[in-house]
Image: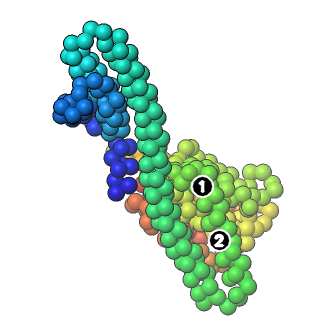
Amino acid sequence: MTDFLVRRIARQPRGMAARIALGLAVAGLALGFRLALSPYIGMGAPFAAFVLGVLVASVFGGIASGVACAALLSVGGAFMMTATGHPAALRRSVLSLLFFVACSGFVIWIVTLLRAALAREVAARESERLLKLELHHRVKNTLAVVQSLADQTFRGATDTEAARRHFAARLAALADAHDVLVDAGWREVTLQTVAERALAPFRPTAPGRLTLDGGPAPVSPEAAVALTLCLHELATNAVKHGALSGEAGAVRLAWRVEETAGRRRLEVEWREAGGPTPAPGGRQGFGARLLTRALAAQPNAQARLDLGPDGALWRAAFDL
């Protein structure tokens, strides 16, 4: 019941006409109630009972409703007091009317402040509820990714210590992706930001061996996580077996956004050059599967990994 009243008070009738109508209706009820009591308590001092009507109108209808209620009650109360036929009571009537107007203004002001605070409280509760639902959804997704990484990393592993190191490195990459998204409020982030954070641990000391080339390309949080894992896998393989394992190799990560027929599509390319020739059939484990499947949840996603004489060539594309 309390929550219902809180929600009802926080809202107000739509449209100025509805708010004014509510105030006039409350004023009419207050006047009718006061007239019904007149045979028992007389017609004097009607304003004492009218402040409650202004309070009710302001609480449920806002400023316009409270002002309309106070205006009608002022006219009705003044008529009731002058209807007694005692000219000597004119001064008392004027003072009573002015005091009622002042009290009504104060009540409307206080209620307006309280309604604003209550509206903020209701909005905060709703924001907290949505945040909990979003957190629950993201935690489930993260746990699913971690479980998949663990299953694929340790499946068939003969060297458990090496598998543990691979798994820890992938978890660190996942944590870096989450740090980037937290800084962005779990909204879209640019591919430039994702790539710089994911590749920071792998940058060679020599300049120009790992270059990033691309314009503004915002990606969703889900795509940012998948791209981070892919870039981590590519960079790890490049350092161990590819272009970054020697002194002469280089890697270029490039991307662009194509716009055709109102559709925006992100194309990403990781190209290694100058690295050792890959062994036939090499790098076809979990890393290769990750690079071709991690982006599968994105709209119209495509990903391909080729092992050429200079190193890995990975191309991926999906709709933004």
- Of marks 1 and 2, which one's residue comes earlier in the chain? 2
Q: Callout 2, which amino acid? A: Leu
In the image, residue 63 sits, relative to residue 318, either above or below, namely above
Dot 2 corresponds to which residue? Answer: 171
The x, y position of residue 40, in whole percent, is: 21, 34
Q: Nearer the viewer, residue 55 or 97?
A: 97
Q: Nearer the viewer, residue 313 or 55?
A: 55
Left or right, residue 254 beside residue 109: right
Left or right, residue 104 beside residue 72: right
Q: Nearer the viewer, residue 101 or 241?
A: 101
> Viewer-nearest of labels 1 and 2?
1
Quadrant placement of the N terminus: bottom left
The x, y position of residue 26, in whole percent, is: 24, 34
Q: Residue at x 47, y 66 (%)?
A: 137
In the image, residue 84 sits, relative to residue 158, either above or below, namely above
Q: Residue at x 58, y 47 (%)?
A: 214
Task: Please tell me in which quadrant of the rendered image residue 21 appears.
Answer: top left
Dot 1 corresponds to which residue? Answer: 182
Q: Residue at x 55, y 78 (%)?
A: 147
**Real-space Cα distance between discs 1 and 2?**
16 Å
Residue positioned most to the top: 87
Q: Residue at x 60, y 60 (%)?
A: 178
On the question of residue 219 being in view, the answer is no
Q: Residues within 10 Å of mark 1 (few under 14, many from 20)?
A: few
Task: Please tell me in which quadrant of the rendered image residue 148 appears.
Answer: bottom right
**Dot 1: element:** helix
Q: Residues within 10 Å of mark 2 (few under 14, many from 20)?
A: some
* Numbered label tally: 2
Left or right, residue 139 beside residue 274: left
The x, y position of residue 12, in whole percent, is: 32, 39
Q: Callout 1, which amino acid? A: Val
